[in-house]
Amino acid sequence: MVYIAGGQRQVQTTQSEVSADLIDLALGHPSPGLLPLSLIRRAARRLRPEDRPLLQYGYEQGDLRFRSLLAGFLSGGYGTEVSPEELFVCGGVSQALDLICSLFTRPGDRVLVEEPSYFLALRIFADHGLRVEGLATDRHGLLPEALREALGRFRPAMLYTVPTYHNPAGTTLPQDRRERIVELCREHGVLLVADEVYHLLSFAGAPPSPMAAFAGRGGVLSLGSFSKILAPGLRLGWIQGSPELLRTLSTCGFLDSGGGLAPFTSAIVGRLLERGTQEAHLQKLRAVYGARARALTESLRERLGVEAAPPAGGFFLWLGLPGVTDTEALLPAARAAGVTFAPGRRFSVSGGQRDRLRLSFSYYGQGQLAEGVDRLAEAARGFRSPGKGS
């Protein structure tokens, strides 16, 4: 796609175009000012002549030097020891999930997810012909009893969960539930795939130990990414699991043909890990996103009368609006007012969650978030849910 900007023809390079006239609170992206181009440029300049092999087909599991640096970074962030042999380098969580579906499931298999769940993961499952079953949740996340009941009814190939700062619900599983969920999956021989992309983005106290802490004993694959803590365009992430499970990934035909994933990019990010630059940038993100989360919840309370606790981490706030029973039906009025959001039905396996919506605080500054809530309040005031009388 070609468009005109500043009198010059430019090619679109980003997934989403952000209109100056619309505040898009559906965007789960970092704001442009948080994309650390200068850090990446300095890291690239530190490449040496002896790094020439990084331009060759990469080692299937990922460069050992990078995995060692990543293991050290994760050990500090997770508060639990991570070994380089438990890490597999990939091109982000979406690619990781697609690869796992290719190698560990077959069309027609069942996958268990939380209700609600990350809507783009549901798209990947659909691409692989998988049947998805939603499991009940509460304000703390997935209910182990719901999982136990589903494991008794079905023979699923996989449980997919977002245990920390859930997308979209923002919930974080307590430690005892994590242990029980891992135990249940092991008892039934079900692969547990934990999308832990937000785990390091905490700004109101540390979360419980990640599901990655259980990965070394088998049956668990933990997915992580630099998309949320550095830059999405790097397309760099990791899978943590037992060496036995990772062997299935690293010996597949896809890598046999193309070699390891992102060897050059991982070398650049490795320089940031080596010098502590990634950790410093992560601390900055925590401060910025924490302030934005507080600003969004305060605006919702003042302008819409919605009481919501500020998220403790991640990107999102999940809520309902007074008098609105179908948030998807509210979208046209919201767009007319100059704001948009992600309606709850998008995250539902069964077409439910219609009275909920997801707001993101990652892209906009505090002033724009407040303006977005003002516009949302304007749309909601003039809206009557379908089926409501006058």
Image (cartoon, rainbow, N blue to C red):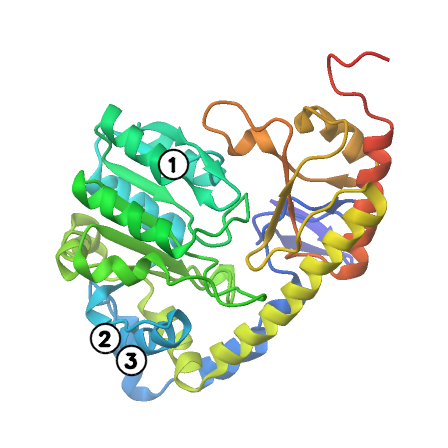
Whether residue 313 is visible, yes or no, is yes
- The amino acid at mark 2 is Leu
Q: Which of the two labelled residues, at mark 1 and mark 3, occupies the earlier sequence position?
A: 3
Tally the numbered discs. Answer: 3
Q: Does residue 225 appear to the left or right of 351 in the view shown?
A: left
- Above-or-below relation of 376 to 327: below
How busy is the neighbourhood of tag 3: few (under 14 within 10 Å), some, or many (20 plus)?
Answer: few
Callout 2 crowding tier (Cα within 10 Å): few <14, some 14–19, many ≥20: some
Location of residue 184 with respect to 75 vertically, above or below: above
Q: In the rendering, which numbered label is found on residue 52? A: 3
Residue at image position (48%, 60%) is 227
Residue depicted at 37% across the width and 77% down the height = 270
Q: Is residue 246 above or below residue 58?
A: above
Residue 64 is marked as 2
**Residue at mark 1:** 113
Question: How many angstroms separate mark 1 from mark 2 (CA)?
Answer: 33 Å
Q: Is residue 217 left or right of residue 68?
A: left
Q: Is residue 172 above or below residue 267?
A: above
